[in-house]
Image (tube, rainbow, N blue to C red):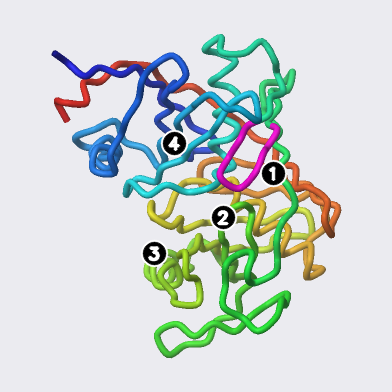
Amino acid sequence: MANMIKFTKMQGAGNDFMVIDGVTQSISLSADTIKKLANRQFGIGFDQLLLVESSAVADFKYRIFNADGSEVSQCGNGARCFVRFVVDQGLTQQREISVETASGIITPKLEDHGLVTVNMGAPRFKPDAIPFVAASAATHYALEVNDQAFNIAAVSMGNPHAVLTVDDVETAPVLPLGSAIEHHPRFPERVNVGFMQVMDEHHIKLRVFERGSGETLACGTGACAAAVTGIQSGRLSSPVKVSARGGELSIAWQGADTPVMMTGPAVTVFTGEIDLDAI
């Protein structure tokens, strides 16, 4: 008997997802199965897999799996696709929902103009909360990688981020340096690595090397991380337009313990069914 599941392929600013309804379907996926589904030649192909589940403390529960099968706590572009999905699938009549994640409750809202705004919560800068090995919190840290010293900012947006400022994102060594920093021992849970080019105080260009997935066309939490570290250091002012390779996001943050608000697109690409035993 075939092991069929229904799914929806979605993207937010080019960051693409396989979204599965685990409320009306019984879903059990191993890391190996997720890796096979993520394969762009032999599977569906995606940066992350998003699983919608029931929650005892919110409207829904949101689980996120990277392309390598590892589970992570947060994904900003995925959160926007999540609310678009549950509304389009008729799982809710609400346009603003509460969603349980491994890093806390978020509240994505489907706007009238079709974009989605997500309250991403307050950023966390204390090293233990990121987690990052450092004696105390600072706006920037020296990080030695392959006998070279780099100046980075570090923050958690529900997942760990390192942000480097570069002169030109197009020529930045995103793949080799991103991979090296992802696995740096000072980041015990690995880290997402952002390469930020400041255009003016309200506009940046950004490329992100995501832990467990490699470089993606956009990263919502990465956009939040770059914007808030730039605002914290005085180089940027809210709101910040973030231009990623796959599209644009708008990030607003008023500082201190206030929440980061992210607005951007969430688009359904196609829907389908797949036999998990056939991949």
User: CB under 8 Å between callouts 4 and 1?
Assistant: no
Q: Earlier in the sequence, mark 3 or mark 1?
A: 1
Which residue is label 4 attached to?
Answer: 16
Q: Please name which of the two marks, 4 or 1, marks the residue nearer to the observer.
A: 1
Q: Label for residue 271? A: none
Q: Main secondary structure of the magenta part?
A: strand
User: CB under 8 Å between callouts 2 and 1?
Assistant: no
Q: Position of residue 25 (x, y in %)?
A: 38, 17
- The reply, left or right, for residue 203 in relation to residue 34 is right
- The reply, left or right, for residue 24 in relation to residue 110 is left
Which residue is label 3 attached to?
Answer: 175
User: CB under 8 Å between callouts 3 and 2?
Assistant: no
Q: Please name which of the two marks, 4 or 2, marks the residue nearer to the observer.
A: 2
Q: Please name which of the two marks, 3 or 1, marks the residue nearer to the observer.
A: 1
Q: Residue at x 68, y 29 (%)?
A: 98
Q: Rounded to the nearest whole Å, what is the CA distance between mark 2 and mark 1?
A: 11 Å
Q: Position of residue 188 (x, y in %)?
A: 47, 70
Q: Earlier in the sequence, mark 2 or mark 1?
A: 1
Which residue is label 2 attached to?
Answer: 159
Magenta region: 99-107
Q: Residue at x 42, y 47 (%)?
A: 71
Q: Position of residue 141 (x, y in %)?
A: 63, 80
Q: Between residue 278 and residue 28, name the one nearer to us.
A: 28
Which residue is label 1 attached to?
Answer: 120
Q: Please name which of the two marks, 3 or 2, marks the residue nearer to the observer.
A: 2
Give the vertical position of 166 relative to 257 (above or below). below
What amino acid type is highlighted by mark number 1?
A: Met
